[in-house]
Image: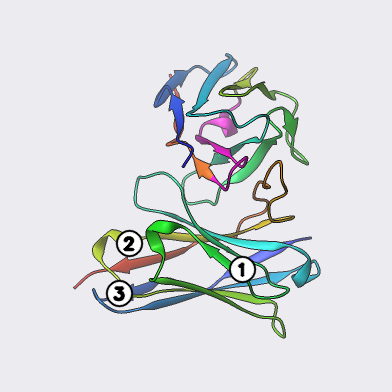
């Protein structure tokens, strides 16, 4: 099983600032990496797939990069609605998720 | 638009079984694969398995083999997930989610969209 490790566990950011989230795979997943956003009491929502392609309706302030084993999700200027938990998922070999990064208001 | 609507919350005793439903609409039911993912309170996401609504074939996470069964009813565009021999560790929110295909030789597919979730509580 491919293990996904996200860092940090919690990220404290002020509105308008940039947030950078990391995700590492235990072996190469090529570009088969997705990011999801989950708000309290809601289901996860697909943000990014193919490591860098925004899903339909996702604002341009969300961007993804990386390939192989190292990936990054960047939120360029945090809005109030962006404070949430973010999960990475590899789908190169079946499906596994990272443990999540909580983005909270500083 | 594609929509997945799940059944309501359940409370079960240890050793019992639970069956959660996921009704799909807004697309051809047999065109996309359906997954189940669970999330224990305050925890991350765990993939449970996949069903092909077209033929009914399934694949399950090794951890749940023997306890989970996924079925579908094409007449109502509904997928079911049944988990047996429940224990307290199975307390979680259970989600259904779609992927547009299974797996090719080079990759599988991400999940989009997801159902609203069903809370299953296992308690004596």
Relative image position of residue A56 (x, y in whole percent) = 78, 41
Q: Earlier in the sequence, mark 3 or mark 1?
A: 1
Q: Which residue is mark 2?
A: B91
Give the distance between the C-alpha atoms of the residues marked 2 and 1, in whole angstroms.
Answer: 20 Å
Residue B85, which numbered label? 3
The residue lying toward the viewer, choosing from A35 and B32, is B32
Give the distance between the C-alpha atoms of the residues marked 2 and 3, in whole angstroms.
Answer: 12 Å
**Vertical comparison of B47 with B106: above or below:** below
**Circle 2: element type:** loop
**Circle 3: element type:** loop
Chain of the residue displaying label 3: B
**Vertical comparison of B65 with A84: above or below:** below
First to last magenta residue range: A79-95
Between label 2 and label 3, give the one nearer the viewer. Answer: 3
Relative image position of residue B44 (x, y in whole percent) = 42, 44
Q: Left or right? Give the position of A31 relative to A98.
A: right
């Amino acid at each position: 099983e491919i293990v996904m490790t996200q860092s940090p566990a919690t990220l404290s950011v002020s509105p308008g600032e940039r947030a950078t989230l990391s995700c590492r795979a235990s072996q190469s997943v090529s570009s088969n990496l997705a990011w999801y956003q989950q708000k309290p009491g809601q289901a996860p929502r697909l943000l990014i797939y193919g490591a860098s392609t925004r899903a339909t309706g996702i604002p341009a302030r969300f961007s993804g990069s990386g390939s192989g084993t190292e990936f990054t999700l960047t939120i360029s200027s945090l809005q109030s609605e962006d404070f949430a938990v973010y999960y990475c998922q590899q789908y190169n070999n079946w499906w596994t998720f990272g443990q999540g990064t909580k983005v909270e208001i500083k | 638009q594609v929509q997945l609507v799940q059944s309501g919350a359940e409370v079960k005793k240890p050793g019992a079984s639970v069956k959660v439903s996921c009704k799909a609409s807004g697309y051809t039911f047999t065109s996309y694969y359906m997954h189940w993912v669970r999330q224990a309170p305050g925890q991350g996401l765990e993939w449970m398995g996949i069903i092909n609504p077209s033929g009914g074939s399934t694949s399950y996470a090794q951890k749940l083999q023997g306890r989970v069964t996924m079925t579908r009813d094409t007449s109502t565009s509904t997928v079911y997930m049944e988990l047996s021999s429940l224990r307290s560790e199975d307390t979680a929110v259970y989600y259904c989610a779609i992927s547009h295909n299974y797996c090719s030789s080079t990759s599988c597919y991400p999940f989009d969209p997801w159902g609203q979730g069903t809370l299953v509580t296992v308690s004596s």
